[in-house]
């Protein structure tokens, strides 16, 4: 099966997250997406935005808050970081990259690729299970995943040269207790890797090529992926999806 590399593919926080779900729903092979995003706060599928970020500050500063399809905590997107997304179709299998039905196994598979890519750029990182990639200075990437019968998505945000104070303050969770069904973010020490975005893109492409034994061709989102993204944009730009209660008319 053809493997594809997508660099960016969309513009703006709402479109970027809509494209993530669109590719997940349409993909049947292997896609590596490496993409930047505007300054934004991306919350997990089962979170309440008002307890994971300062909603009023985000509104004042024009910082979009966007709910993603995957679980996990709130993350910062913006200048100085790069998002990586690994999509694997159910029938795909090459080297160590294949469809897995176990989220911890998915995290290990994806983290192995990222750790090898940062090493190729001269930065040692490692997986702290279940879903954090660390360097000696702190957390450099988290991970979140979505598994369906057709395929899987595992994605994360690698800190390159971000404004760490801004990233931390925008993702500071409120110190309140919520029902266990709501996922809470955890404040952790974060750190930049100092890697350039072009270097990381080249390294990740090389690691995936090495692992699968085949070329990963640069490409763009397909027409079905773009059509699906367009159909999802209504939801991803809707305050009810992004700021509402995920268990009361939010994520389906």
Image (cartoon, rainbow, N blue to C red):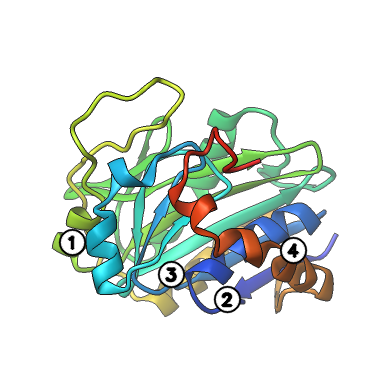
5 left or right of 50? right
Which of the pair 1/223 is nearer the observer? 223
Is mark 3 in CB contact (under 8 Å) with mark 1?
no
Which mark is first along the chain, 3 or 4?
3
Which of the pair 106/208 is nearer the observer? 106
> Mark 3 to mark 1: distance in Å?
19 Å
Q: Is residue 215 visible?
A: no
Numbered mark located on residue 214 in the image = 4
Residue 110, x across and y down, in percent = 54, 46
Q: Is residue 149 visible?
A: yes
Numbered mark located on residue 164 in the image = 1
Which of the pair 147/135 is nearer the observer? 147
> Mark 1 to mark 2: distance in Å?
24 Å
Which mark is first along the chain, 4 or 2?
2
> Depth-wise, is mark 4 or mark 3 nearer the camera?
3
The local secondary structure at tag 2 comes to strand
Residue 169, x across and y down, in percent = 17, 55
Is mark 4 in CB contact (under 8 Å) with mark 3?
no
The local secondary structure at tag 3 comes to helix
Q: Which residue is mark 3?
A: 200
């Amino acid at each position: 099966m053809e493997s594809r590399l997508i660099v960016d593919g969309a513009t703006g926080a709402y479109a970027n997250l809509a494209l993530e779900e669109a590719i997940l729903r349409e993909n049947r092979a292997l896609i590596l997406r490496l993409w930047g995003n505007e300054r934004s706060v991306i919350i997990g599928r089962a979170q309440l935005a008002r307890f994971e970020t300062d909603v009023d500050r985000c509104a004042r500063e024009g910082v979009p808050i966007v709910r993603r399809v995957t679980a996990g905590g709130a993350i910062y997107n913006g200048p100085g970081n790069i998002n990586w997304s690994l999509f694997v179709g159910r029938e795909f299998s090459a080297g160590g990259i294949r469809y897995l039905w176990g989220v911890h196994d998915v995290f290990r598979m994806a983290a192995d690729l990222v750790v090898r890519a940062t090493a190729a750029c001269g930065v040692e990182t490692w997986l702290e299970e279940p879903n954090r990639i660390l360097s000696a200075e702190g957390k450099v990437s988290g991970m979140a995943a979505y598994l369906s019968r057709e395929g899987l998505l595992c994605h994360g945000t690698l800190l390159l040269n971000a404004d760490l104070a801004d990233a931390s303050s925008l993702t500071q969770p409120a110190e309140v207790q919520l029902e266990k069904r709501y996922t809470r973010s955890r404040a952790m020490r974060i750190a930049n890797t100092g890697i350039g975005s072009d270097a990381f893109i080249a390294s990740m492409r090389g690691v995936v090529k090495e692992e699968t034994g085949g070329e990963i061709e640069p490409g763009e989102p397909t027409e079905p992926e773009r059509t699906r993204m367009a159909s999802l944009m209504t939801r991803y730009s809707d305050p009810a999806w992004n700021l509402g209660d995920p268990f009361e008319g939010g994520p389906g």
